Structure formats: structure tokens, C-alpha cells
């Protein structure tokens, strides 16, 4: 596969990033396409790739939920998404059929995890988690070097978390109210405090940041105890709050309460920022393209 030209897509609810190259460190072309209707967005994506040198395979790291069971007729499709108009959209079939190439598809967070595993903060590891905290909360889980799938991909954003003792906010999740995402997503922060942390007065901003660290640590406790990762990478817009990762590490130590007592959990390289910054998703698309080409 050396030298093969791949296509990569990071498909989001707001924008799609499309790139062509042999890998993240060798890009021939890249573009941004706003997310509108499925037909318009996919049409513009297909036009972009048709106007590039022919690719050998395509990788798609997409928002979801996705059907990732290969024996299902709707494999590679977005299923029941809250994104208006996008439910039951066949991504893999539409793109693969139009471009005539094998397509590898997975969630945006699994794609980001794959990218971080090849080029970023998880190089050399086989079992780790990529958590994004932004408009929503989601996690990509790699176990023995492979994304974890079952009946559906993991939905870490909807696990239950203990409430902060000073928090009376009801939560924003339309399904569960005060689940992890309902209490700790970017919109939840803004709704609770009246603005983003960066726009708050210093004392209030610090209180908001500490409460956010509490909730993120609550979510990470579930990840530590159920998945036993070697490392947890936390990205997304909320993770850019000043001192975020250190605050989360400290809060995690409190909520683990000395169990299971591993020194690795206390290390500064257990909860880390993405090594690729906001490029983890597009990097993952190239890894998915590699996997699709190898399987074809």
C-alpha cells in the first residue's frame, strides 16, 4: 500500500473536512464543506474527490450514530441522528459507489482515536480512549489496537455521573437530562453559567472550570473502571479551558479514591491533550482508508 493515494473525510454536523494524500504528513489537497442537506453535502464532497487525482481508498470518520455491523443492509449509514434530515443517510454506499473505491467508515471519535494512535498522543499503545468534550460528549475506544464495536459503538456521553454538591442545573440531554453529556457538554456549561467560561469574570470562570473538571473526572472514572485504558486523551473545545487537563487529573484522583491504586493513573501522561490538536479526525480518516484498502 506504500504510495497509494487515500481520501480522508472528517464528517461533522457543522462541516466536513476532506483531504487527499498518502497520509497526514503528505497532503496533496484539502477543503472544508459546510454541512447542509445530505444530497447537497455529499454531492459537493463527491465533486471534490472527482476533481483530484484518483484515490485508491476512502476513510470516513463521521458523526452518528452509525450502523457499523457489516452484516446489516444499512451498514455505513447514519441511523437515528438528531441532526435534521440526516437520519438513515447511507454514507459508505453513496461515496463508495460514486467514487468506485473501498470505503472504511467509523465514528468521528473512533477515527480520532485511530489518528492519535498512529501520529499523536497514543503512539505505541494498543488500549486507550479518545474523549471529546464539546457540543456533545463522545468517546472512541481502542482495545488491542481495534475500535470497540458491539450492537452499537460506545456512547460514553450518556453514562450516569454523580452530581456536584453545588450544582442545581437540571441538565440538557433530551434523552436523559443529567447524564454526562447533559451536565458537562459545552452547551450545558453556557446554560448553567450564562456564558462560556472564557467570557466569565475570573472568579466565576474558575468555579465553572472546577465544576467541569469534576464532571469530566466522573465520566473518566467509569472509563477507568470498565475499560482499563492505558491512556485517556481528552479533546474538544471545552478541553481548551486554561488548566483543564491538570484540573481533571486532580479531580480524577479524588473520585478514584485510591482504587485500584495504580501509579499510572496519577501520572501526567495518563490524562492528556490530543497530540494532533484538531487534526485527529482527519488523521483517522487516513487510517480508515488504509484499513479499507488492506481489506479490499
Image (cartoon, rainbow, N blue to C red):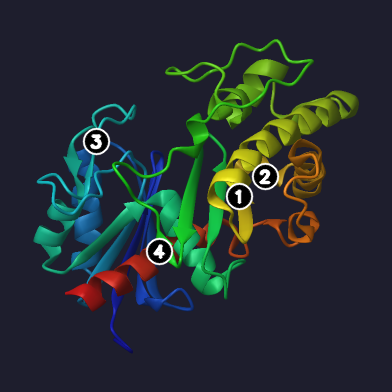
Mark 1 vs mark 3, CA separation in Å: 25 Å
Nearest to N terminus: mark 4 or mark 1: 4
* Badge 3 density bin: few <14, some 14–19, many ≥20, Cα 10 Å: some
Quadrant showing the C terminus = bottom left
Q: Are marks 1 and 2 in contact (CB under 8 Å)?
A: yes
Image position, residue 71 (x, y; %): 13, 52
Tag on residue 40? none
Mark 3 vs mark 4, CA separation in Å: 22 Å
Tag on residue 79? 3
| Residue on which disc 2 sits | 239
| Residue at figure coordinates x 24%, y 35% from the top left | 79
| Residue on which disc 1 sits | 235
Does residue 234 sit above or below 206 in this rendering? Answer: below
| Residue on which disc 4 sits | 146
Which type of secondary structure does the marked residue at label 3 adopt? loop
Instruction: Please state which of residues 50 and 133 is positioned toward the viewer in this rendering.
Output: 133
Does residue 209 sit above or below 12 in this rendering? Answer: above
Residue 55 seen in the current view: no
Amino acid at each position: 500500500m506504500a504510495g497509494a493515494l487515500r481520501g480522508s473525510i472528517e464528517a461533522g454536523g457543522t462541516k466536513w473536512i476532506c483531504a487527499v494524500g498518502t497520509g497526514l504528513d503528505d497532503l496533496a489537497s484539502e477543503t472544508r464543506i459546510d454541512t447542509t442537506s445530505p444530497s447537497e453535502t455529499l454531492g459537493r464532497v463527491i465533486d471534490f474527490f472527482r476533481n483530484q487525482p484518483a484515490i485508491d481508498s476512502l476513510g470516513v470518520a463521521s458523526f452518528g450514530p452509525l450502523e457499523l455491523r457489516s452484516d446489516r443492509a444499512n451498514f455505513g449509514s447514519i441511523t437515528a441522528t438528531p441532526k435534521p434530515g440526516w437520519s438513515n443517510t447511507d454514507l459508505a454506499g453513496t461515496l463508495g459507489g460514486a467514487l468506485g473505491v473501498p470505503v472504511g467508515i467509523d465514528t468521528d471519535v473512533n477515527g480520532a482515536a485511530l489518528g492519535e494512535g498512529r501520529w499523536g498522543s497514543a503512539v505505541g499503545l494498543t488500549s486507550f480512549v479518545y474523549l471529546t468534550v464539546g457540543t456533545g460528549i463522545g468517546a472512541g475506544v481502542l482495545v488491542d489496537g481495534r475500535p470497540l464495536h458491539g450492537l452499537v459503538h460506545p456512547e460514553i456521553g450518556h453514562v450516569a455521573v454523580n452530581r456536584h454538591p453545588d450544582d442545581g442545573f437540571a441538565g440538557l440531554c433530551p434523552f436523559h437530562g443529567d447524564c454526562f453529556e447533559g451536565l458537562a457538554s459545552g452547551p450545558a456549561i453556557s446554560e448553567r453559567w450564562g456564558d462560556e467560561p472564557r467570557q466569565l469574570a475570573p472568579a466565576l470562570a474558575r468555579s465553572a472550570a472546577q465544576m467541569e473538571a469534576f464532571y469530566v473526572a466522573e465520566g473518566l472514572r467509569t472509563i477507568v473502571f470498565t475499560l482499563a485504558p492505558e491512556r485517556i486523551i481528552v479533546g474538544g473545545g471545552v478541553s481548551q479551558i486554561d488548566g483543564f487537563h491538570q484540573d481533571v487529573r486532580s479531580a480524577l484522583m479524588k473520585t478514584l479514591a485510591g482504587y485500584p491504586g495504580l501509579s499510572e493513573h496519577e501520572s501526567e501522561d495518563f490524562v492528556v491533550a490530543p497530540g494532533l490538536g484538531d487534526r485527529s479526525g482527519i488523521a483517522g480518516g487516513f487510517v480508515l482508508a488504509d484499513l479499507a484498502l488492506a481489506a479490499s
